[in-house]
């Protein structure tokens, strides 16, 4: 009976320790990110304002843009879902554009055009052209210039626009403006 009592005590103690240890790192991490955000808050806000001017779209809800410029490695509130939506917006926009030009385009050629524009390195180049590597938030030891990071921000940007307007077409139009180079003369 004594060993069962010790086992129950051990389980309760272990669960208490786990609960305390799980809450402590999140508080420290959140505080470090909060402190870091406080130090660069005005610079980040200024960069977001500049980005909006460069892409020719002003967000009604700038928090969507903030999230689009926050990599998953930085925070739980990040661009992952917006990036997925943005990828679909870009793919749809490319498909519509190709089909407008040639309704008889083969599926192979259509997929080739979509892949050419949506692959990570290509969208990272487009994102770098916009200066996203200087805006996107990553952890202190993260690499904001890594192609997957820049690409997630680039795609997330168009996902955020779609959510902000409630229309994927609006996000697609901004994508084409950026992709065609209307905003390409600006660099951060």
Image (cartoon, helix red, strand yellow):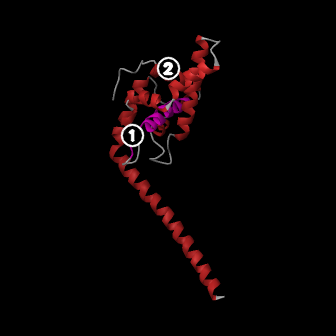
Residue at the image position 55 percent from the left and 28 percent from the top = 165
Which residue is labeled 2 in the image?
A: 176
Q: Is 158 placed above or below 12 here?
A: above
Q: Main secondary structure of the magenta part?
A: helix
Residue projecting furthest to the front: 108
* Number of on-image labels: 2
* Any part of residue 134 in sight: yes
Q: Residues within 10 Å of mark 1 (few under 14, many from 20)?
A: many
* Residue mark closest to the camera, 2 vs 1: 1
Residue numbers of the magenta segment:
142-163
Nearer to us in this view, 151 or 182: 151
The quadrant of the picture occupied by the N terminus is bottom right
Left or right side of 119 for 46: left
- State the image quarter where residue 188 is shown: top left
Q: Earlier in the sequence, mark 2 or mark 1?
A: 1
Q: Is 25 placed above or below 43 here?
A: below
Q: Is 60 placed above or below 141 here?
A: above
Q: Secondary structure at mark 1?
A: loop
């Amino acid at each position: 009976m004594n060993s069962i009592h010790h086992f129950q005590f051990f389980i309760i103690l272990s669960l208490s320790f786990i609960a305390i240890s799980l809450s402590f790192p999140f508080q420290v991490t959140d505080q470090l990110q909060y402190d870091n955000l406080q130090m660069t808050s005005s610079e980040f806000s200024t960069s977001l304002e500049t980005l909006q001017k460069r892409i020719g779209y002003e967000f009604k809800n700038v928090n969507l843009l903030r999230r689009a410029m926050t990599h998953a490695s930085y925070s739980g509130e990040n661009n992952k879902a917006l990036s997925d939506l943005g990828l679909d917006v870009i793919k749809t926009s490319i498909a519509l554009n190709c089909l407008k030009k040639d309704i008889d385009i083969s599926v192979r050629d259509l997929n080739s055009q979509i892949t050419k524009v949506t692959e990570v390195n290509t969208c990272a180049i487009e994102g770098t052209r916009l200066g996203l590597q200087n805006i996107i938030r990553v952890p202190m030891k993260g690499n904001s210039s890594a192609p997957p990071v820049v690409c997630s921000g680039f795609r997330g940007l168009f996902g955020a626009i779609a959510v902000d307007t409630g229309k994927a077409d609006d996000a697609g139009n901004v994508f084409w403006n950026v992709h065609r180079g209307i905003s390409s003369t600006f660099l951060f």
